[in-house]
Image (tube, rainbow, N blue to C red):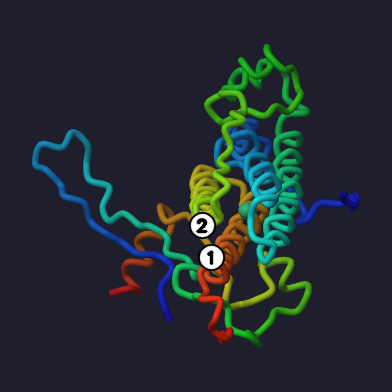
Amino acid sequence: MSTSRKWYTPYVSPNDPCPPLGPISYETPVQLYLGFQPRGMEQFSPFEALTHGTLWPGLFTPYTNPYLSKREELNTDG
Amino acid sequence: MWYYEKKLQYPVRVGICNPRMAKFLIEQYGGADGELAAALRYLNQRYTIPSRVMGLLNDIGTEEFAHLEMIATMVYKLTKDATPEQLKEAGLGEHYVDHGKSIYYHNAAGQNFNMGIQSKGDPIADLYEDIAAEEKARSSYQWIINVSDDPQINDSLGFLREREIVHSQRFREAVELLKEEQSKKRVF
Ligand SMILES: [Fe+2]
């Protein structure tokens, strides 16, 4: 399974005016990897599909504010 | 032609009285990568796209109008009960002087909607444009979620962002359909 969020750490200069923000995230959602959607992919129930914004769990890539979750995610990623 | 259903595609709840959010949300209403631009772009491009994918542009273009309505509902809820003084504090003073409480097609920086929507008449150029536009709309939703402290608005914005993901996926599949060698059998 691909991860839908990646991180990189920009160069920090000793002359930077502000304290470094740390690693920067960017999103890599599922459509970058799926190719042509295969037939017969598992489906949500109609109600679940509405709340998720898609009929297929395989297309669901939720988003959370990375500034709030940065610390935990970096830890779980190792 | 269209049939209109008198309900939103997804419920819109605004939990926190923060008119400043309206200023951010208006980006998706009248901004370059907003829902109006998307709807107009797809419904315009569909005439000169191969018939295999014309229906896709038609469907997605129609859905974008349903998204536009959701954004309008959020903006309206956030501004309808604000005093002119509160609107001024929210950075909407200029908006109020120009348009009163009415919603308007401009971006978060107050620039009027720009009709320069992309349409090249080349199927691949147009679909690549559309994929990029969907990814840009997805990013806009992320940036708005990052500056929002209202979990209920973020729930609706999360829905809209997921729709951009599905649209991007479908446009990518449309490219695959069009680049397929016509002598070959179709295997998925
Ligand atoms: Fe879209």
- What residue is at 73 percent from the left and 38 percent from the top? B72
Q: Is residue B48 above or below residue B50?
A: above
Instruction: Depth check: give the residue in front, B26 or B167.
Output: B167
Q: Quadrant of residue B177?
A: bottom right
Give the CA separation, mark 2 to mark 1: 7 Å
User: Tag 1: residue type?
Assistant: Val
Residue B115 x/y as whole percent: 62, 30
The chain ID associated with circle 2 is B
Front one among B157 and A30? A30
Return the residue at label 2: B124
Indicate the quadrant containing the C terminus of chain A: top left, top right, bottom left or bottom right. bottom left
Mark 1 neighbour class, 10 Å CA radius: few under 14, some 14 to 19, many 20 or more: some
Q: Which residue is mark 1?
A: B175
Earlier in the chain: of badge 2 and badge 1, it is 2
User: Where does the image place residue A1, in percent across and percent down from the top left?
Assistant: 43, 81
Q: Position of residue B174 (x, y in %)?
A: 58, 66
Amino acid identity at mark 2: Ile
Q: Is mark 2 within 8 Å of ligand 1?
A: no
Q: Say whether residue A74 is left or right of residue B26.
A: left
**Residue at 56% across, 23% down:** B111
Q: Residue furthest left?
A: A14
Measured as percent of width and height from the top left, residue B60 is found at: 69, 56
Labels 2 & 1 near each other (Cβ < 8 A): yes
